[in-house]
Image: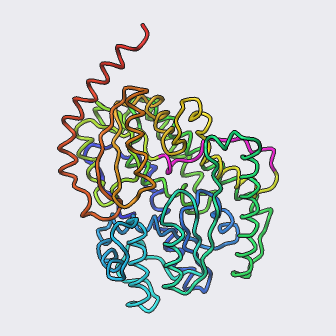
Amino acid sequence: MAKEEKGKSILRLKSMYPLRAKVDESYRKGIEAMSAGEPTVWGMLNFYLGDSILKTMGIQTVYPENFSAALAASGMAQTFLDAADADGFPTHLCGYSRANVGYTSVMMKECEGHVPPGVPMGGMPKPLFLLASAAICDARYKWFQSLGRYMNVPVWNLEAPLPGVKEFFIGDAYEQAVQLGIKNLRSFVRFVETISGRKMDWAKLEETVALMIELNRIWYETSLLRRAKPCPMHSRDFWSAMPAALFSLGEYGETIGLFKDMYDEVNQRVNDGIGAIPNEKYRLIFAELPPWHTLGFFDTLADRGWNFVMESYAYHPPVPIDLSGINDPLEKISRFNLQFLVGYYRSARKQAVPVAQLAIPYYEYARDWQCDGALLHSLISCRSLSIHLPYVAEMLLEKLNVPSMMVEGDIVDLRLFNPEDALLKAVPFEETMNHYRTIRNRKKPD
């Protein structure tokens, strides 16, 4: 991400800054690894499946999705969006993929395989191979296949078996998904050993996985602290710190210490009654992906007393699961990843919500974090994280009397987001939130 700007009304966490620095550090190490002749990988967000394996084997990984967000935040994305357009990629594709494809095109065609000049965080060097994933996103396979053709490097696809809500509770469907995940991970380890010439240290992998799980436990517990009134941590700080956990940036041992520091700072704010904004009038959820190019939009809303107390489900760690009785680190990875995908299935069945992992978390967030509303960012270029949002809005209103405000935009393409138009909706939406707050208060037991 680009250098953080301090919001006018948002009291930023001091512990966020060293976690934010892990992003720059990771990309710098990627450049250093390439210069030293060491292998570097471009990895798609894979929700914990491949990261620990690569980290254990000493292979530096950078993440095109995270880097595309940095291009948007730095104001440089348009150059690479134009390059993707010129190469014939349609403008309705995922903004992350378009910016990344354009970056790769410029790197290979204009810079002879070197990092384009002036890009944020030192850029992404040409990788040894590309690590794709099947999880959630529509564009994943073809996106990385296109990158492989530009750079003439192999592409490995990590499968993410995901049973539906109904199928999840039939027979041994869950265990079959776990075993398929283990099988795929063993194949991936063999592939990495072959292409890198390095052997897996299984004892070290076990230690790495344990650290990954512990890090995400602390991160999860930090989010629970945000139930306090006033909420001690705004979404801006969550998004800044999130890559260190979601993208496994930095050494786990050091990063755990930084997340502990954040937990302690947020906990201290709870004890002292300090909110992330000075006058919390409204508590909101944000879903799904933020407009990285216009994060100042949230400062303006903070001036109005809007505190964003929870955000996109896909950025949060899985609900904790006990894996202490499992010895095989690949099985731990498989179960941990699957927990991220199916951790809300029982709640979904109980609430009769068919869109489990992409809808039911927002029901629990709105209920448990005592939210007044939800700001739903419908992405023109991302069907996967937009198609369920009307259902989320209907579900929150029907089940909890929590209204939603829909804003159309994009994660990367600034031309597709109109913050002025979105802010015009704020005043009438405040009236709506006040109305439904009155209804909820009437329904509370004496």
Q: Position of 339 compared to 7: left or right?
A: right
Q: Quadrant of residue 196?
A: bottom right
Quadrant of the snapshot with the N terminus: bottom left
Q: Position of 380 compared to 400: left or right?
A: left
Q: Position of residue 378 (x, y in %)?
A: 34, 51
Q: Position of 295 compared to 111: left or right?
A: left
Which residues are drawn in magenta?
313-326
Q: Position of residue 177 (x, y in %)?
A: 71, 52
Number of on-image labels: 0
Q: Position of 29 compared to 114: left or right?
A: right
Q: Position of residue 176 (x, y in %)?
A: 75, 51
Q: Is residue 62 above or below residue 260?
A: below
- Of 29 and 89, which appears nearest the observer? 89
Quadrant of the snapshot with the C terminus: top left
Q: Is residue 257 above or below residue 308?
A: below
> Going 30% across and 56% down the picture, which residue do you hit?
409
Q: Is residue 420 above or below residue 446?
A: below
- Of 133 and 27, which appears nearest the observer? 133
